[in-house]
């Protein structure tokens, strides 16, 4: 009867191969985000035996709240979104992507290659494009670069880095702020950079604080095994971001510098 009992329990346990939803801040339109993250969710499902599906979020706030409230169990977050989610909901950092082998990235200020703008001081009286209104790190980089927001003739929040790059290429805005790898992607179409931020701690995959330790461990192991030096790994990583080549374990203290940078901009 002990054997019967065990076999009766097995299906229930495997049915609980829980479904995990992976969320993300919106770095692009939802359709493009689905395309970027589906190879990763397929890889994670295969590697962990969990059922991982992608769930797009319209903006930074919703990505933070969905992870905190458990509508998503894991999320791909900007440093600022992570800091907010950690403060509000005690989410835990899981892994950070490596960009060209480093666990940091840069924000760059770019102009059209034909522009006569040479440096940050030349931005006085010019139009400027940013992403999400809550992306305080973008603002901090601009201000620390020597330009206050009120010095622009106008500025716009265009939601996604791809939109910013296209707006500067189309000359809808005279300058804009971009993640380094997005700048690399669009530079050859006619962008030039005039300012690069200091190295900033990477974007991060974070998990809801109620996630069971075994699940956390499975996910982390799967992420750390993902490397660009093999065909499968490369395909998944390059779809996510063309500059990514692997992952490293992330810790909360990695984000203390960014906490300091954005502190003056938090209301």
Image: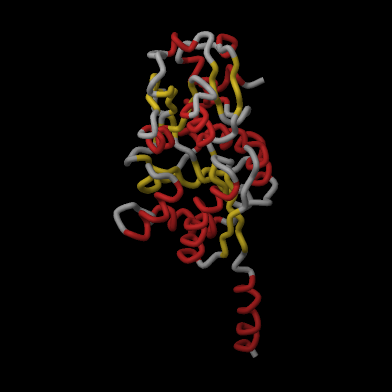
Comparing 123 with 222, the one in front is 123
> x, y percentage for residue 199?
39, 28
Image quadrant assignment for residue 11: bottom right
- In the picture, measured across the screen, residue 137 lies left or right of residue 186, that is right
> x, y percentage for residue 203?
48, 38
Image quadrant assignment for residue 58: top right
Name which residue lies at 48% across and 12% down. Answer: 123
Q: Is residue 220 depicted above or below 262 in this figure?
A: below
Comparing 157 with 174, the one in front is 174
Name which residue lies at 54% across and 34% down. Answer: 163
Furthest residue in direction left, as rendered: 229
> x, y percentage for residue 161?
51, 34
- In the picture, measured across the screen, residue 164 lies left or right of residue 90, that is left
Count of numbered labels shown in the rendering: 0
- In the picture, measured across the screen, residue 106 lies left or right of residue 266, that is left
Q: Is residue 50 depicted above or below 102 in this figure?
A: below
Name which residue lies at 55% across and 55% down. Answer: 213
Q: Quadrant of the C terminus?
A: top right
Name which residue lies at 53% across and 22% down. Answer: 173
> x, y percentage for residue 201?
44, 33
Q: Is residue 170 depicted above or below 97 in this figure?
A: above
Q: Quadrant of the N terminus?
A: bottom right
Picture colour scheme:
secondary structure
């Amino acid at each position: 009867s002990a054997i019967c009992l065990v076999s009766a329990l097995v299906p229930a346990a495997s049915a609980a191969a829980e479904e995990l939803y992976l969320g993300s801040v919106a770095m692009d339109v939802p359709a493009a985000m689905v395309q970027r993250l589906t190879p990763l969710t397929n890889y994670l499902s295969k590697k962990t035996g969990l059922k991982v599906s992608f769930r797009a979020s319209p903006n930074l706030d919703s990505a933070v709240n969905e992870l905190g409230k458990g509508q998503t169990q894991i999320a791909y977050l900007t440093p600022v979104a992570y800091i907010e989610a950690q403060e509000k909901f005690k989410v835990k950092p899981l892994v950070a992507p490596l960009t060209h082998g480093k666990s940091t990235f840069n924000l760059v200020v770019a102009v059209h290659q034909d522009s006569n703008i040479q440096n940050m001081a030349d931005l006085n009286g010019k139009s400027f494009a940013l992403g999400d209104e809550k992306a305080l790190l973008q603002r901090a980089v601009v201000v620390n670069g020597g330009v206050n927001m009120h010095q622009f003739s106008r500025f716009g929040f265009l939601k996604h880095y791809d939109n910013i790059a296209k707006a500067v290429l189309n000359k809808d805005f005279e300058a804009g702020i971009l993640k380094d790898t997005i700048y690399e992607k669009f530079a050859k179409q006619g962008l030039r950079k005039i300012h690069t931020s200091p190295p900033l701690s990477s974007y991060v995959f974070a998990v809801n604080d109620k996630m069971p330790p075994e699940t956390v461990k499975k996910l982390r192991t799967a992420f750390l095994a993902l490397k660009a030096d093999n065909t499968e790994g490369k395909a998944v990583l390059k779809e996510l971001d063309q500059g990514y080549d692997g992952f490293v374990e992330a810790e909360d203290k990695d984000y203390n510098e960014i906490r300091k940078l954005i502190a003056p901009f938090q209301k």
